[in-house]
Image (spheres, grey):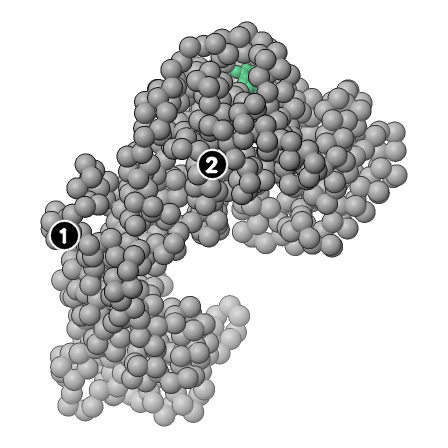
């Protein structure tokens, strides 16, 4: 991109410092900073939390019990009294407008101040939330605006048109920033800067969707016109907000559409399926593929047979059997004389795949190698050479596979296991290891549809929605320390029956010493005092790879009966004989993570249990989250609950996924707008028109601005 094309980006009229707004000095700017607002644009996109309906001044007889309302009246009586039950003091003012009476009550007040203001006979306008208590209507702590002796209420809409006869925005505040000040600042920002806001969203799309231009949408979102329905404002479905949400989703989906198209336009491999290796492998398996596994394998095959590079997400709950589908797909690529790379997020998982594949591929006369950060320099050199000359058919490993210096002779298929641990960058890096190879990414994190359309919006989706037969669902219990001894007894009885167990400690960071200490101490105490007759192992991220491998081997073979571990076992570990898992400080884990962990048990025929240990002090939200785990084994349900409780940014770290943050849109609420925006964006991009058409120059610029470098839009130049 040339320097001159860069310029319009820098001259965004909204990227103006806050100090340009009247009334914003260093003190206020600091308060706004606390709200995450750094320039005028961020102020404009910070929409009101809600609106007060001050369109009309109601008759007292017309007040209802639903939200804040405005009414006027004359003061009939004033006085201090006590609440009936708790004997707390309160100040009461009774007002009437001829149609009815309202009792206004204050529970926190300064008496002299009240006495001075509220005088029988005075007229005022009141703003508050009426509640009915039997026959009496009350309003607690209303706002009060006194009227001059001869001033009528209708004059207010003329003398103070920003507070009466309209909707009033209510903004998010921070300590020291008052609602009135906030309104003034936002008002200034909206009046002076909203008209300068411009979106290159094509007119025909805006009209088809019946949306407002950006400037108008911003104005209306802050100061809705009186015709707007209050219900729509409350529900966030008003036209102004919908227009802003659409705009935001549209550019996201346009980016995704281009990314998808960029890949589709490339010439990849058109594989043929000869069953040379897949049929013999199927014979070697101790089980038959499930219906769902066969269906997705067919979807993958069809994708691999066309020349366009595959870009597919394979989603399946923990234990649904994605690995074997990946291996079958790998064999198709190998049958066509190309190589395959499989990348997993942890050494343990990569090793496990390697160890599982190795004997099968050996029998098929194929060569698979393992490559990780801890492969010795000498071994690595030899392995890299074999990969480069094409002696190796399949490489299984960690991030190390993606590094520079790993060159393939002819990479036909890249597979990423547990995609949620990787980002868009890693996907792109794997793709670059070959000449438009097919790509299969797998995840056990079930993603609500709205998230799938955003984070993985450029991928085709295959879902394994069936578990292999013969599994008994895991029973989950949430326990406090009171039940700890019982829990240990349960584990003892399981191990005595020849089954195995995990005890998991949280480890937020591999580098957190205190967490590691907790796991180590826990291990020592368990071995000495609780399970002296069993063999325990301690697995954590600081161990050397050989040590980890050794431990896993001993656990798999049953030599170790109880594995004490940090979350390194979270993904993918497969030991069907393990039937109980105890998780310490369960409240410190994310739901998706707990679900993953729990997926390590219930893999065999034995009845399995997951014991979530929580502290007595666990917060309300924490308890709610754990309750979801107890109630449900359905990864999809858990993911949605997680999304509701924690929000999308937390659920799939936005940075990690390469997604921009949403300023207005809300993935939970705005799913329908998302679908519409997606359809329009994909339609626009279809049939190459978009990339070469100078008409869309500013659309492309806008995309760059919004996505920055995150999109890897090679095709945008
Ligand atoms: P995930 O989808 O979580 O990666 P895995 O691929 O690790 O699951 O499979 C979980 C377990 O199920 C493994 O022990 C695997 O051998 C077994 N498995 C896979 N497919 C089947 C099947 N069709 N029938 C029986 N067991 C299967
Ligand atoms: Mg797996």
Horizontally, is 487 left or right of 680 in the view? right
Place residue 533 in its image quadrant: top right
Q: Position of residue 300 (x, y in %)?
A: 39, 22
Q: Dot 2: within a 10 Å radius of its alpha carbon, few (fewer than 14), some, or many (20 or more) residues? A: many
- Residue on which disc 1 sits: 695
Horizontally, is 410 left or right of 144 in the view? right
Q: CA distance from mark 1 to mark 2?
A: 35 Å
Q: Position of residue 135 (x, y in %)?
A: 31, 64
Place residue 310 in its image quadrant: top left
Horizontally, is 92 left or right of 601 in the view? left
Q: Secondary structure at mark 2?
A: loop
**What residue is at 29 percent from the left and 64 percent from the top?**
3
Residue 603 in sight: no
Q: Secondary structure at mark 1?
A: helix
- Residue on which disc 2 sits: 433
Q: Are marks 1 and 2 in contact (CB under 8 Å)?
A: no
């Amino acid at each position: 991109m040339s320097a001159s094309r860069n310029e319009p980006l820098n001259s965004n009229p909204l990227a103006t410092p806050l100090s340009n707004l009247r009334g914003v000095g260093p003190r206020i700017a600091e308060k706004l900073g606390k709200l995450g607002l750094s320039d005028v644009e961020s102020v404009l996109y910070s929409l009101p939390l809600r609106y007060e309906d001050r369109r009309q001044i109601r008759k007292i007889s017309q007040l209802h019990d639903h939200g804040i309302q405005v009414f006027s009246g004359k003061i009939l009586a004033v006085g201090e009294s006590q609440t009936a039950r708790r004997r707390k003091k309160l100040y009461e003012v009774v007002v009437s407008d001829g149609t009815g009476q309202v009792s206004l009550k204050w529970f926190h007040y300064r008496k002299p101040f009240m006495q001075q203001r509220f005088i029988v006979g005075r007229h005022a306008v009141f703003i508050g939330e009426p509640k009915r208590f039997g026959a009496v209507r009350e309003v607690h702590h209303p706002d009060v605006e006194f009227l001059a002796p001869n001033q009528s209420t209708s004059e207010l809409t003329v003398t103070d048109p920003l507070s009466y006869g309209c909707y009033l925005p209510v903004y998010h505040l921070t300590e020291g920033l008052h609602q009135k000040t906030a309104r003034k600042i936002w008002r200034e920002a909206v009046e002076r800067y909203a008209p300068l806001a411009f979106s290159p969203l094509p007119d025909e799309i805006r009209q088809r969707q019946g949306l407002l231009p950006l400037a108008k949408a911003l104005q209306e979102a802050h100061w809705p016109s009186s015709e707007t329905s209050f219900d729509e404002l409350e529900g966030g479905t008003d036209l102004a907000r919908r227009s802003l949400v659409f705009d935001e989703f549209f550019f996201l989906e346009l980016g995704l559409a281009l990314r998808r198209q960029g890949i589709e336009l490339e010439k990849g491999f058109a594989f043929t399926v000869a069953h040379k290796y897949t049929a013999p492998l199927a014979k070697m398996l101790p089980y038959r593929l499930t219906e769902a596994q066969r269906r997705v394998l067919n979807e993958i095959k069809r994708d691999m047979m066309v020349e366009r590079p595959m870009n597919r997400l394979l989603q399946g709950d923990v234990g649904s059997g994605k690995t074997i589908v990946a291996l079958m797909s790998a064999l198709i690529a190998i049958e066509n004389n190309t190589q395959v790379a499989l990348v997993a997020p942890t050494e343990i998982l990569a090793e496990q795949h390697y160890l599982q594949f190795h004997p099968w591929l050996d029998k098929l006369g194929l060569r698979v190698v393992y490559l990780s950060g801890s492969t010795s320099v000498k071994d690595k050199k030899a392995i890299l050479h074999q990969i480069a000359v094409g002696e190796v058919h399949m490489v299984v490993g960690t991030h190390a596979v993606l590094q520079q210096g790993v060159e393939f002779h002819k990479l036909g298929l890249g597979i990423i296991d547990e995609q949620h641990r990787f980002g868009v960058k890693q996907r792109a890096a794997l793709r670059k290891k070959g000449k438009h190879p097919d790509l299969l990414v797998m995840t056990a994190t079930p993603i609500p549809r709205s998230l799938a359309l955003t984070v993985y919006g450029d991928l085709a989706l295959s879902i394994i929605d069936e578990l292999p037969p013969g599994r008994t669902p895991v029973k989950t219990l949430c326990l406090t320390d009171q039940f700890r001894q019982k829990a240990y007894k349960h584990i003892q009885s399981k191990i005595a029956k020849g089954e195995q167990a995990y005890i998991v400690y949280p480890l937020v960071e591999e580098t957190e010493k205190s967490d590691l200490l907790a796991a180590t101490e826990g291990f020592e105490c368990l071995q000495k005092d609780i399970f002296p007759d069993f063999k325990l192992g301690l697995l954590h991220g600081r161990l050397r790879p050989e040590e980890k491998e050794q431990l896993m081997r001993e656990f798999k073979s049953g030599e170790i009966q109880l594995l004490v571990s940090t979350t390194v076992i979270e993904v993918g570990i497969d030991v069907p004989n393990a039937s109980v898992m105890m998780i310490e400080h369960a409240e410190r884990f994310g739901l998706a993570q707990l679900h993953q962990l729990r997926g390590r048990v219930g893999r065999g025929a034995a009845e399995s249990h997951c014991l979530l240990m929580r502290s007595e002090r666990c917060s309300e939200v924490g308890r709610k989250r754990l309750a979801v785990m107890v109630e449900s084994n359905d990864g999809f349900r858990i993911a949605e609950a997680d999304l509701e409780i924690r929000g999308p940014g937390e659920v799939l770290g936005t940075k990690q996924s390469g997604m921009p943050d949403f300023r207005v849109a809300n993935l939970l609420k705005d799913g329908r707008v998302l679908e519409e925006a997606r359809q329009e964006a994909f339609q626009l991009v279809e049939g190459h028109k978009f990339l070469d058409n100078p008409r869309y120059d500013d659309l492309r610029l806008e995309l760059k601005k919004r996505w920055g470098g995150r999109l890897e839009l090679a095709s945008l130049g």
